[in-house]
Amino acid sequence: MEKDKIKRFFLGSKEREGFLKQFVVYALLICIGFIYLYPILYMLSSSLMTLDDLLDSSVNWIPSSFNFNNYAQAGASMDFWKSLFLSIIVAGAPTLLNVVSCSIVGYGLARFEFPGKKVIMGIIIFSFILPSQVTMIPTYVLYSNLGILSTLWAFLLPSLLAQGINSSIFILIFYQFFKQVPKVLIEAAQIDGAGYFKSFVRISLPSAAPAILTVFLFSFVWYWNESYLTRMYVSGVMTQSGWTTLVVQLQKFAANYNSYAQTAASGAVTLNESISMAGTMLSILPVLLLYFVLQRYFVESIDRVGITGE
Amino acid sequence: MKKEDRQAKKQKVRIKPGRLARREAVTGLVFVSPWILGAAIFLVYTMGSSFWYALNNIRITPLGRLFSFVGVGNFTQILLVDTDFTPQLVSYITSTVLSVPIIVVFALIIAMLLNGNIKMKGFFRLIFFLPVIVVSGPVMGMLTEQGAATISTIDTQAIGSAIGSFLPTGIADAITDLFSSMITVLWYSGVQILIFLSALQKIDGAMYEAAQMDGGSGWECFWKITLPTIKPMILLNVVYTIVFISGNEQNSIITLIQDSMFSGTKEKGYGYASAMAWLYSLVVVLIVAVFAALLMARKDVYERQVRKAKRERKKEARLVKKIERRGIRNARKIEKARTKRKYSTYDGSGDY
């Protein structure tokens, strides 16, 4: 009897899972979770170390004293507050336009029937697969001809025309979502005298709040993390415009820091691993905070909106 | 009868859209027009001129851009002379082809673990989605540079030598690289996990119950219910992964393209970089196409049977039509014969 009970406890029965299986599942999850977190934990711990701790092989994870000076120096060399402000603008402004343009286009595709719709959907998917490198050089030339290279307009213009970073995905998200809005609702509004545009703004758009949030968050994060195109179009490769972002600053961290260390009078130490890690931490900290505050929406949004495109 | 038939056919083809439908179509086009304009500028125009650039050698002079037509010169230069591009392209292909299945399978496993009945589901989802938020070129560069992207306790050297003993060196090297950048690979599977998770949650639980009642084990349920149901999601994730890997700044080829774009040497420049970008995009699209073909090729049993039945039905219909036609022909023949020699033969109808 007792033996049976133990057996059931470990291997489980029809009704509930056994301890053994649950143990394996949790062990796997925790192991993989640790691997996922490892770089961030490593970054956090080594960014707080002093130079002595770095060199001391007995100090592995927890520094002997929390050295926030690393953050101060990294932040000063990156010009943290100004870069943060500019990053928010560089990521935020195209994101807003992206939400506007992609919602309009997605609505047009979901609600109306017109010839060539299938072709347009095909091109949207194709433009998602096509690497941006193909169109990059003529776009660069185009911007320089228009005189908007190294200004924020180089990001605003494409997102205004629903061609920003990953705009295809956002159009599809809105398309998916507006398909679920019952057509009857819109027809009722039209019987009551609303035009096409009004029924979009007053009926469909308010019900699409989850989709808007999803698109906003993802677009913001993707623009925030984009360094290649930002450097190319907005902050400039050869010449420096006034625009910069934290991620772009991080890319040039070593050079920036060295020039900072030379000019700074207040005994800046030479670049070491801790300072690099502090700089990296600083550049991801804002989105990390955003994520922790809004994580519910981030994670659940894909469920609700159905990015899955069935 | 025949005439009517033809008329009905004609009517079916020529349904004129009503005024409302036409107005809806126009409004739809108005709504989509920003995208159409954008695609015309940022897709069609840029692709066209990029192709034109690729066929030219472009030099930037104080007077402007100087084009000189070289035909496929840029391409031959890249493929035959350039010492960086081809090896990097090959290593990109091998690493993509190897890591895409790993990322997708891994994402599926995690999604299935998370889909089970576990505590702190939200917490684990939070962790697995974290990389999507922080992963960017410079951050990954910094982390790999400082060695945070490999777990030092895993002895990659031992794994490498173990694999190298029974595989050719090229593949073994690629696998060893994969192990040493395991975290990078895992970090790329955040969105994929969520896509799989939401697909898994949509599977009807009753199906599993029915299967269990018929004595299906969990293993069988996975292969016969879970996998076929989420098959479209697998394709979606594969495509997403490939696109993500190829656009990521960790990818050395896109840096190479940028470098040659701004390089001051005589043979490089915009044209050269465009040709490179075209070759690269061709490879990316090809990889996507190959994976898509592989995943779509295997129809499951049900679909195969449906197709077979459809084929047979068509065959039958053809046969019926054939017989019908023959009948009509014969009837006509008999009719003709009858009118010709009206009173000469007895056709069995009773009237002479």
Image: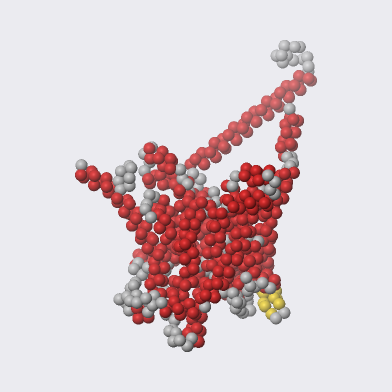
Residue at point 40%, 71% (across, down): A44
Above or below residue A70? Residue B31 is above
Residue A93 occupies which quadrant of the picture?
A: bottom right
Q: Residue furthest bottom?
A: A265
Way the structure is coloured: secondary structure
Above or below residue B273? Residue B309 is above
- B233 lies left or right of B337: left
- A100 lies left or right of B114: right
Residue B79 seen in render: no
Residue A153 occupies which quadrant of the picture?
A: bottom right
Residue A188 seen in render: yes
- B337 lies left or right of A41: right
Residue B214's x, y, as percent? 38, 37
A232 or A65, nearer to the observer: A65
Q: Quadrant of the N terminus of chain A?
A: top left
**Count of numbered labels shown in the rendering:** 0
Residue at point 44%, 87% (across, down): A267
B5 or A234, nearer to the observer: A234
Q: Residue furthest front?
A: A192
Residue at point 33%, 57% (across, down): A27
B290 or A55, nearer to the observer: A55
Residue A291's x, y, as percent? 47, 63
Residue A124's x, y, as percent? 61, 56
Residue A278's x, y, as percent? 44, 75
Above or below residue A187? Residue A141 is below
Residue at point 48%, 54% (across, down): A300
A222 or B289, nearer to the observer: A222
